Image (spheres, helix red, strand yellow):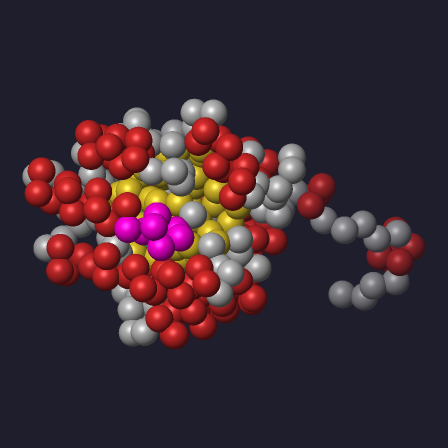
């Protein structure tokens, strides 16, 4: 397929064709997502939880995001690859934000960056966009603010809170964001934002009225045998498949069934006969 670009995504919104988006953190998964034709691939700082085993995203660093985003990009050359800005890489000052966003473009070759926050990040988004770097905004449940939000909780559930998110989305678009991600808000709120917005609005737990959908790949594949958020649909149970293979391998090693002859390298008989014990 042709490279997925911002004009292509804008065109999909105009034609009311839904955009598919998925998180991805490494090369093998990127190859599969590229093959499946996923439009947008997000190397999210959720890798702190899905790949590194932290209980949140705050420990994730720029160096981690650069290394993982670059691996994803190598596996998915035609997808629109977005690198996520980790905690403290953009909050300190717009100048630091531009430098760190630039690192993701320069060192990981991503097509776009993503950061969390609305009104408070408007100036920062403007500076990054002015540097020629596309920005996706992220509103609603913003995991880097989990402590301030009082936990991983749905947002925008009162009319007052909803209007704040609607205003934030309008402002992000006004300062040049090329797309907006809405996480864990009611569909009614996401519907208003999507209708008002000229740029594609993507949902993760924000209902059916958006221009596209995102899921965390480890959640939708059923990689973990544990709690997933309400908005997750499990499309597979990879956990069971991998566990069955590991159990069988351990069993066959212990019983001496693996390796069999077909897994071993041959040697001419006359050469074997020259071997002394
Ligand atoms: O890091 C991530 O995967 C994200 C999504 C949860 C929206 O930001
Ligand atoms: Na994130």
Instruction: Indicate the quadrant where residue 181 lies.
Output: top left
Taking the image as shown, residue 181 lies to the left or right of residue 73, namely left
Above/below status of 260 relative to 122: above
* Magenta-tinted stretch: 171-177
Q: Is residue 176 magenta?
A: yes
Question: Which percent across, then down, holds residue 173?
Answer: 35, 48
Question: Which percent across, then down, holds residue 55?
Answer: 24, 58
Taking the image as shown, residue 48 lies to the left or right of residue 6, namely left
Instruction: Indicate the quadrant where residue 235 lies.
Output: top left
Instruction: Indicate the quadrant where residue 212 lies.
Output: top left
Q: Depth check: give the residue in front, 172 or 222.
A: 172
Q: Depth check: give the residue in front, 25 or 179.
A: 179
Q: Is residue 109 magenta?
A: no
Seen at 39% across and 74% down, the residue is 95
Seen at 23% across and 57% down, the residue is 119
Q: Is residue 97 visible?
A: yes
Q: Is residue 70 visible?
A: no
Above/below status of 186 relative to 176: above
Above/below status of 129 relative to 35: below
């Amino acid at each position: 397929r042709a490279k997925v670009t911002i004009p292509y995504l804008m065109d999909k919104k105009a034609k009311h064709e839904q955009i598919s988006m998925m998180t991805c953190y490494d090369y093998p998964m990127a190859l599969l997502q590229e093959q499946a034709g996923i439009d947008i691939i997000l190397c999210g700082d959720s890798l702190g939880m899905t790949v590194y085993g932290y209980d949140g995203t705050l420990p994730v660093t720029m160096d981690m995001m650069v290394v993982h985003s670059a691996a994803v990009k190598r596996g998915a050359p035609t997808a629109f690859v977005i690198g996520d800005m980790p905690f403290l890489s953009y909050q300190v000052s717009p100048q630091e934000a531009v430098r760190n966003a630039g690192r993701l473009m320069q060192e990981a070759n991503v097509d776009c960056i993503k950061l969390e926050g609305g009104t408070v990040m408007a100036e920062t988004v403007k500076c990054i966009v002015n540097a020629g770097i596309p920005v996706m905004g992220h509103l609603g449940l913003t995991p880097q603010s989990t402590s301030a939000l009082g936990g991983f909780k749905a947002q925008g559930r009162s009319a007052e809170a909803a209007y704040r998110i609607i205003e934030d989305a309008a402002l992000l678009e006004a300062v040049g964001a090329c797309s907006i991600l809405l996480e864990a808000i009611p569909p009614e709120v996401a519907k208003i934002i999507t209708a008002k917005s000229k740029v594609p609005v993507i949902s993760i737990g924000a209902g059916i009225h958006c221009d596209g959908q995102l899921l965390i790949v480890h959640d939708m594949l059923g990689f973990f045998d544990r709690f997933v958020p309400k908005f997750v649909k499990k499309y597979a149970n990879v956990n069971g498949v991998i566990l069955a293979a590991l159990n069988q391998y351990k069993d066959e090693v212990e019983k001496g069934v693996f390796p069999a002859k077909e897994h071993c390298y041959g040697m001419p008989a006359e050469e074997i006969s020259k071997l002394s014990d």
